[in-house]
Image (cartoon, rainbow, N blue to C red):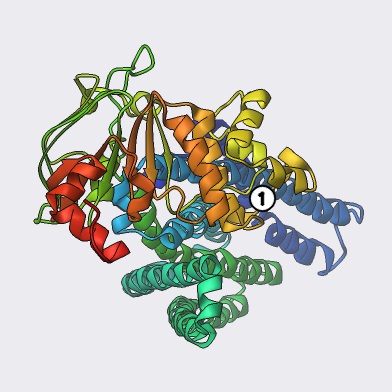
């Protein structure tokens, strides 16, 4: 039988652990070998112990029975221990590979995939794949061996009656084949609904403040209940489909047992078999039901695992960001040049940026302004190569950034975004984020420069205080200053500021603006600004509209032109535009 490609791929992961799997196989062999021992003991006990004068030594009976179950217990433990060790190790490895791939995927990945779906694949679907391989390996090997051993014993005992039992096997295979296709389709739909439910839970946890302020608890509860109900329906349909195979299999077995009993009685009346033969045969045949049941039930986890593997391997096969490029041997000077740059987001035909020509000198502060959707954030996101340009080139110190390794390129940049991202770690760890050997003195200096001294002093453990999920133990302004301190600590030659002071009150804004002015000296700084008052002292202001540069110059020069920038200034502040 040809194995499905995803199953073969999952099975290949076990290759490095073939030694431990061999021990598990030995355990399965011993377990299977003990199966026919018990009915064999029953035959001897009945034929030599209960009919006429006993010819058995009494001590042999408990020794044989206890010995069988001791051997069986040891072999079962060996199998379970080895399989658990291998599968738990593989589960960690698979989750590690997914996490590593998630860190390496390009920014465009999240345009089509939600965080909830990624979490679902990493935590839930990987477990289903491992369970599939474990259950299939265990059932396919141990239960097949058990069936083989018991059938061999039955053939030896009474080959005529055994042919009746053999009718079970092709019928069971037919039932599994018919049911398997439906179960796989149900499992695929089940996983999609489960991913949606995970996404709802993740969004609810992330947006709890918005939910409360807009009174959307009932709306979110309805969303949750709809998906939870759909998940329950799919669970019921899957279990009904898989459970239906078991009674059908058992009915076929019961029919075979009934026929065997009738034929055995006929043989006994002719003196062709003994009581021990009959009881031993029936015992062995009934013992066949359990492994046959396991083989029938194997289709359930098999189909669930195959459905899960489609999503997991699609994630693992996602093309990562480029890995080539030259490593910069020294700190960049900071000259940036945009040569006829055009850009369209993946999957979009329309260009978000068109024919951008711009040269930024080392240490120059350039502010990008314009109406929403003009292309400011898109343009700046091309500099750290979050996206690759569609046409043209971006040069750093005269070298195309596509020729520079991403790690080396991004090491030259620090960023403070409007949407601050902090981690549930200490203050010190957040400031020195990404530094494998943090310098306590630099951390303190960065905190001072970002005016965080009073904030840190008020925390219970100072620098070693954990700040909660995304810094939720801090105020909005404090979180923004933490992000600024992180950029100060990195001390990169290129600085990207995306509304870096947007969450600050007036007093904090003045303090941080002063710190930023010190930080910006000698650094190439790209500023995305909506409040024009924050960029009046920029060396140059570039106005973007419809993905194109429509104006550039100093604040005063652009006001004097009375063009697009002057119009924006008038919209924000009203009245007459100063001469």
From the viewer's perspective, tell me whether residue 333 is left or right of residue 83. left
Foreground of the two, 95 or 118: 118
**Residue 3, visible in the rendered structure:** no
Single out the residue that lies furthest toward the top.
329
- Residue 28 picture location, percent across and down: 60, 47
From the viewer's perspective, tell me whether residue 38 is left or right of residue 13. right
In the displayed structure, would residue 476 be above or below residue 334?
below
- Residue 353 picture location, percent across and down: 14, 48
Foreground of the two, 479 or 150: 479
Q: Please report the residue visible at 43 percent of the width from the left and 26 percent of the height from the top.
A: 492
- SS for dot 1: loop
- Residue 347 picture location, percent across and down: 16, 55
Q: Please report the residue visible at 29 percent of the width from the left and 59 percent of the height from the top.
A: 112
In the displayed structure, would residue 520 be above or below residue 31?
above
Mark 1, residue position = 467
Q: Please rate how many residues cluster around mark 1, counting C-alpha atoms within 10 Å: few if below 14, some from 14 to 19, many from 20.
A: many
In the displayed structure, would residue 2 be above or below residue 234?
above
- Residue 144 picture location, percent across and down: 50, 55
């Amino acid at each position: 039988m040809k194995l499905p490609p995803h199953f073969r791929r999952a099975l290949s992961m076990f290759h490095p652990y073939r030694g431990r799997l061999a021990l598990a196989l030995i355990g399965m062999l011993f377990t299977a070998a003990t199966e026919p021992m018990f009915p064999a003991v029953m035959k001897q006990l009945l034929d030599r112990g209960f009919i006429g004068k006993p010819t058995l030594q009494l001590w042999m009976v408990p020794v044989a029975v206890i010995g069988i179950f001791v051997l069986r217990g040891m072999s079962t433990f060996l199998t379970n221990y080895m399989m658990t060790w291998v599968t738990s190790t593989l589960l960690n490895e698979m989750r590690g590979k997914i996490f590593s791939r998630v860190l390496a995927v390009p920014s465009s990945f999240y345009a089509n995939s939600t965080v909830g779906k990624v979490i679902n694949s990493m935590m839930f679907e990987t477990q289903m794949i491992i369970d599939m391989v474990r259950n299939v390996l265990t059932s396919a090997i141990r239960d097949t061996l058990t069936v083989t051993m018991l059938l061999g014993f039955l053939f030896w005992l009474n080959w005529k009656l055994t042919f009746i039992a053999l009718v079970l096997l092709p019928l069971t295979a037919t039932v599994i084949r018919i049911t398997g296709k439906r179960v796989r389709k149900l499992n695929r739909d089940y996983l999609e609904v489960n991913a949606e439910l995970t996404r709802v839970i993740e969004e609810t946890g992330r947006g709890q403040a918005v939910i409360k302020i807009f009174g959307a608890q009932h709306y979110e509860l309805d969303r949750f209940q709809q998906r939870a109900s759909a998940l329950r329906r799919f669970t019921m349909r899957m279990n009904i489909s898989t459970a239906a195979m078991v009674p059908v299999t058992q009915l076929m077995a019961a029919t075979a047992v009934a026929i065997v009993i009738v034929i055995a009685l006929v043989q006994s009346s002719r003196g062709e078999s003994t009581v021990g033969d009959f009881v031993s045969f029936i015992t062995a045949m009934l013992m066949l039901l359990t492994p046959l049941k396991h083989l029938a039930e194997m289709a359930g986890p098999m189909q669930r695992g195959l459905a899960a593997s489609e999503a997991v391997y699609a994630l693992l096969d996602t093309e990562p960001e480029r890995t080539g490029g030259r490593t910069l041997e020294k700190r960049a000077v900071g000259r940036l040049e945009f040569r006829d740059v055009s850009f369209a987001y993946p999957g979009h035909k329309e260009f978000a940026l068109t024919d951008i020509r711009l040269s930024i000198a080392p240490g120059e502060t350039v502010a990008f302004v314009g109406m929403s959707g003009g292309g400011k954030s898109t343009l700046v996101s091309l500099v750290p190569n979050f996206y690759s340009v569609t046409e043209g080139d971006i040069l750093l110190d005269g070298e195309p950034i596509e020729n520079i390794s991403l790690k080396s390129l991004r090491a030259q940049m620090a960023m403070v975004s409007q949407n601050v991202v902090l981690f549930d770690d200490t203050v010190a760890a957040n400031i020195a984020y990404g530094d494998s050997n943090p310098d306590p003195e630099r951390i303190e200096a960065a905190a001072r420069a970002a005016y965080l001294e009073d904030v840190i002093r008020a925390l219970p453990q100072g620098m070693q205080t954990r700040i909660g999920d995304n810094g939720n133990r801090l105020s909005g302004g404090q979180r923004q200053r933490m992000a600024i301190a992180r950029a100060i600590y990195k001390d990169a030659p290129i600085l990207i500021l995306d509304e870096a002071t947007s969450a600050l009150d007036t007093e904090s804004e003045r303090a941080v603006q002063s710190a930023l002015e010190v930080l910006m000296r000698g650094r190439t700084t790209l500023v995305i600004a909506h409040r024009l008052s924050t960029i009046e002292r920029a060396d140059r202001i570039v106005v973007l509209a419809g993905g194109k540069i429509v104006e550039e110059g100093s604040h005063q020069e652009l006001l004097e032109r009375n063009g697009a920038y002057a119009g924006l200034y008038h919209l924000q502040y009203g009245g007459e535009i100063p001469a």
